[in-house]
Amino acid sequence: MPAPSRRPRRPAKAAPPKRLPRSSSRPPASNRPRRPGSQTAFPALPDDGLERLQKVLAAAGIGSRRACEELITTGRVEVDREVVTVLGTRVDPLNQQIRVDGERLPSPSRVVYLLNKPVGVVTTNYDPSGRPRVVDLVPTDRRLFPIGRLDRTSEGLILVTNDGELGNLLTHPRYGVEKRYLVQVAGVPTPETIESLRQGVALSEATVHAKRVTVRSQHKQSTVLEMVLDEGRNREIRRMLAALGHKVQQLKRIAVGDLTLGNLLPGQWRRLSWDEIEKLRRSAIDAVGKLPPPRPPRGRAQGPRAGRRPPGRPATSSRGRPVERPAGPGPGRPRRPGKASSWRKGPRKPPAD
C-alpha cells in the first residue's frame, strides 16, 4: 500500500524589519504639536496684559489667524525691530512696535457695533453665494465678525465686533447671557405647550428649554410669544416650537443682556460706548467668577447714530477735504439690503382665559 503523501511545508514568514533608532532631529514629546482631541491641558497664561502675536495681527485686520501665523513663521513680522518667528510670542500692542513687511501696525482698537439685522441678510463672514452679510452693513475697514447668529429669515439685534474675548463671553453657555426674542407662531399654544417650553423639549442633540416664556398677544390665527434663552443652538427656537406642533412665522431678537434695539430701523447700527461694553462684560463674568481688570478705552465712542455728522457740518474726507454727495436716493447711495420689518403695530390684546 503506497505511503500517504505529505503536504509541502509553508515557507517561513520573513522577520519584520528592525526599527531604526529615533533621529536626534525629532523634537521631544513636550514640544510636539498636540493631536486633535487630546485631553492634555496647557497651563493657564498669566494675566499680565500681554496677547499672542498672531491674535494681535488678526485683530488689526492683517488677515485670518492662520494667515498671520504664516507671516510670523516666514519671518515677515518684527517686534521692536527684531524678527519674531516663534508662534505664541506674547506682546504688548500698546507699548511695543509691531511691523509687518517693514510697515508699522496701527494701534489696535476694539469696537462693538449694535445692528438691527434685516430679513434676508446672513450672519456668516464667508458666503459663496454672494448674499448680503451683516458685516457689510457697517462701513468700516476693520475686520469684524458677528457675535452669535441669526438665520436668514430672522431679524433683530446682533452685535458685530473685532473683540474675540467679548464674543466668547456672550456666546459660551457657561456665562448664561440672556437673549430675548419675539416669536410669532401659527395657532394658539396651550398652557401645556408653554410649560413644555419651560421644562424642556427633546431635540436630536440635547434637551433644550427656554428660561422664560410669556404670551404677549393673540390674534385669530397666530400668537406672539416672548421667549428668553441663555444659550444659542442652531435654529433652536424654530426647532423647539416645530417639535410641539407650532410653525414659527416671524422671529425677532429684541435684547441681549441689557442692550435693546431702541429706535434702530432694520439695517441701521450704532457703536457701543465704553460703559455699555463694560456693563455687558460684567453681566457675563459676574455669573461665574471674578471680573478681570478692564482695559482702558481706546478711541472715541460715537453716539447713538454712529457715522452721522452733526447737522450743519459739511461732509469731509479723511484728509479734511469737502466731499459732494447726492441729496436724493440716487445711484450714489446704495440701497440698504434686506427687507423692512413687518411686525404688527397696535394695542396689545390680552390673552384669552
Image (cartoon, rainbow, N blue to C red):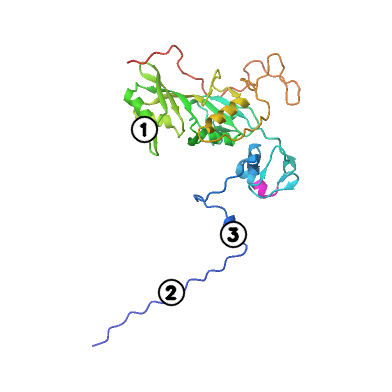
> Percent x, y for residue 146?
55, 32
Q: Name the mark nearer the viewer: 1 or 2.
A: 1
Q: Main secondary structure of the magenta part?
A: helix
Residue in the picture at 63% in, 18% down: 330
Q: Is residue 26 left or right of residue 172?
A: right
Q: Which residue is mark 3?
A: 28
Which residue is tagged 1?
201
Q: Residues within 10 Å of mark 2 (few under 14, many from 20)?
A: few
Which residue sits at x=27%, y=83%? 4
Q: Is residue 39 left or right of residue 328?
A: left
Type of the residue with mark 2: Lys
Q: CA distance from mark 3 to mark 1?
A: 49 Å
The span picked out in magenta is 70-75
Is any atom of residue 51 visible in this view?
Answer: yes
Disc number lying in front (2 or 3): 3
Amino acid type at circle 1 is Val
Q: Residue furthest bottom?
A: 1
